[in-house]
Image (cartoon, rainbow, N blue to C red):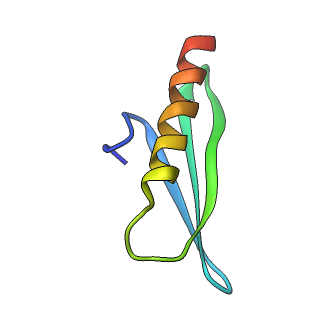
Amino acid sequence: MLLIGSGVREIRIMHEGQYRVIYVTKIADLIYVLHAFQKKTQKTRKHDIDAVKQALKQLQNEV
């Protein structure tokens, strides 16, 4: 997920559809879930990418 930022990872779940969980682990040795969503098309929606970027930025400002 270099598009989002360094250390950001993705879990892909395929069960009655496709789901994504985006998380980061390199901040204070904890795992932070940044965003989770159901993926309905081949391409990830801009709305979801923006939500992840915003959550990561907010987390970096707080830690």
Name the residue at the left extreme. 2
Q: Position of residue 45 (x, y in %)?
A: 45, 60
From the viewer's perspective, tell me whether residue 7 is left or right of residue 39: left
**Which quarter shows the C terminus?**
top right
Q: Is residue 46 above or below residue 5?
A: below
Q: Residue at x 65, y 36 (%)?
A: 32
Quarter of the image where one finds residue 43? bottom left
Question: Residue most toward the bottom?
Answer: 16
Foreground: 9 or 56? Answer: 56
> Would you place residue 8 above or below residue 40 in this image?
above
Hey, which residue is sitting farthest front in the picture?
47
Residue 12 drawn at (x, y percent)? 54, 67
Question: Is residue 57 visible in this depiction of the protein?
Answer: yes
Looking at the rendering, which quadrant does residue 6 occupy? top left
* Residue at 53% from the left image edge and 32% from the top image edge: 54
Q: Is residue 58 above or below residue 17?
A: above
- List x then y, in percent, for residue 10: 50, 55
Count numbered badges in the picture. 0
Q: Is residue 63 visible?
A: no
